[in-house]
Amino acid sequence: MVKALRLSGELQTRLLIFLITAVVLACYLPTLNNGFVWDDNANFIQNINYRGLSLSHLYWMFTTFNDANYHPLTWLSLGFDFVLWGMNPAGYHLTNILLHVVNTIFFYFLIMAFLGRTAAFQSAGLIAAQVGAVFGTLFFAVHPLRVETVSWISTRGDLLCGGFYILTIIAYLRMNDKKAADGRGKWFLLSLFFFMGSLLSRAWGITMPFVLLILDIYPLRRFDFGNGSIVSCKRLLAEKTPYILLAFGAGVLAFWAKRGSMLMMTEHGIIDRFLQATYGLCFYVFKTMAPIRLSPFYLFGKDFNFLAPIYFLSAVSVFGITLCLIVMRHRWPWILTGWACYAVVVSPLLGFVQSGPQIAADRYTYIACMPYGILAGAGVYRLWIEWQGKKLFAAMTVIWVALLVLSVMSFRQTRIWYDNRTFLDHVLKLDPGNYIASYDRGLLREKQGDLVGALADYTNVIRLDPEHAKAYNNRGVIRDRQGDRAGALADFKTAIRLAPFSPEAYANLGMIRLSQNDIQRAVQDFSKALEVASVKWPHREQVEQQLNYLHRRLDPP
């Protein structure tokens, strides 16, 4: 009888995993029609170093800081993609989808591991836990905030890191399972192994030691606060030493990789950073509850005002939520644990050390908001236990309809990543003041031959950011092609004033001078372009030839 029940439970698990897989695939399969978008151009189209699995390719993968990250396992997975698919983006997207499916299955078992530790598990039965785990898993997997991570090939590292992150915690829970006491050492080593995998996929894993300490408090209850055992605390902290050392090493590598893209405290003070951090904490919670107006690019604007009421409101909200959960910790320990884990995991991405022009990003929720999936699953688990009859049926109906709505929203969100034009149009539709997106769309329009549209975009960039030298230079090129020599001349001069070491602006100014038959000034401009240009400047040879021709005109043999 026991064996039959066990087999029945195994069959239920397989069927539920099949259901979860089918739902996730249906939600994200449209991404197979998408191409390389945004940073994919620099990471894959212009980058030949990852294309293969030879010793030279592997050496590059394990030594490069390309893309301001050290993530060799991510590059290794992309190298496999190239071997399998070449430069067909559908293959890369398929790998992303499959990784997300695998992570989703891991997440189901993670929720089951947590629910299995509850006091009600033995009396509630397996079905209650499975219903809660399925809901929590799908809430995580099909939420629109996941679309960016799954649909954008450049976020491959988050998918790999997320999978290893989940496995690390599962192994850690098994390590502290009294039923598996004989295999404690094995599970400890497995946990460390998975942790190293997360660190080699993305530096996000550096938060793991703190998450494990939180779990030691609850639900593992390994800290004996009642007896105040110092020996017990020291033992638990000593146990975390390998995790801390690995995290510290990964943190150093991450800092070194991002040092060129970081906006340090000199521009924004500690109070500004703190208010930005509390804003981020509230932002992701709000977007989880109301995933509307999701953008791939929430710009950290140049005119960003941290004195705006929303940032003080965010700080008050964070303090209020934290204080309330601490006061109610005996009644709501799960929620306090989830909030603490969320804050710890997302902390490196909240702006204390700003990297990149974004104030927030949907992809930052992939691991950080996993606690909300677990809490959602635990909530449904409690409802299943405590509610009966029509009340439970009505609640379950609302819950599954909500999941359906989230799935449809994600399905539609995947289309935003179809190509660069669709992507940029969506960003600018939500935020017309995003000068970076406007500039990128101008480049795209210019490349596609839409000079009128490109001119409008560059003009919009200059309106939003009057010190954008490249926008002046590019607008000058278009004005010159349209016959507006005076406008082009003014733009090139402004570009040089704003960026005195721009060889493109000097070369373009030289061409205007040459068209006006001002050969002496043209020679000066071309000479200056070569003086400030790097050795690898792609137009160096062309400008050198032009300069030699002008010298022969000025000093014929």
Image: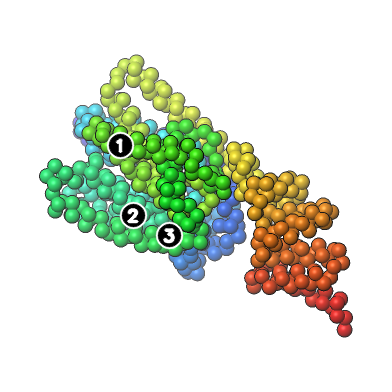
Residue at 71%, 71% in the rendered image: 528
Q: Residues within 10 Å of mark 3 (few under 14, many from 20)?
A: many
Looking at the picture, tell me which residue is in the foreground, 252 or 278: 278
Task: Between label 2 and label 1, give the one nearer the viewer.
Answer: 1
Q: Quadrant of the N terminus?
A: top left
Residue at 59%, 49% in the rendered image: 37
Residue 269 in picture, x, y percent from top left: 45, 52
Looking at the picture, tell me which residue is in the foreground, 232 or 502: 502
Tell me the CA gap for discs 2 and 1: 31 Å
Q: Which mark is residue 254?
A: 3
Per the image, label 3 sits on a secondary structure element best described as: helix
Per the image, label 2 sits on a secondary structure element best described as: helix
Q: Residues within 10 Å of mark 2 (few under 14, many from 20)?
A: many
Determine the image quadrant of residue 113.
Answer: top left
Tell me the CA gap for discs 3 and 2: 16 Å
First-in-chain label (3 vs 1) = 3
Q: Is residue 28 left or right of residue 179?
A: right
For the residues bearing labels 2 and 1, Cβ distance under 8 angstroms: no
Residue type beneath disc 2: Phe
For the residues bearing labels 3 and 1, Cβ distance under 8 angstroms: no
In the picture as drawn, the residue positioned furthest to the left comes out as 227
Q: Quadrant of the C terminus?
A: bottom right
Task: Between label 3 and label 2, give the one nearer the viewer.
Answer: 3
Residue type beneath disc 1: Leu
Residue 346 in picture, x, y percent from top left: 40, 46
Q: Which residue is mark 2?
A: 195
Q: Which residue is mark 1?
A: 323
Per the image, label 1 sits on a secondary structure element best described as: helix
Q: Is residue 172 left or right of residue 362?
A: left
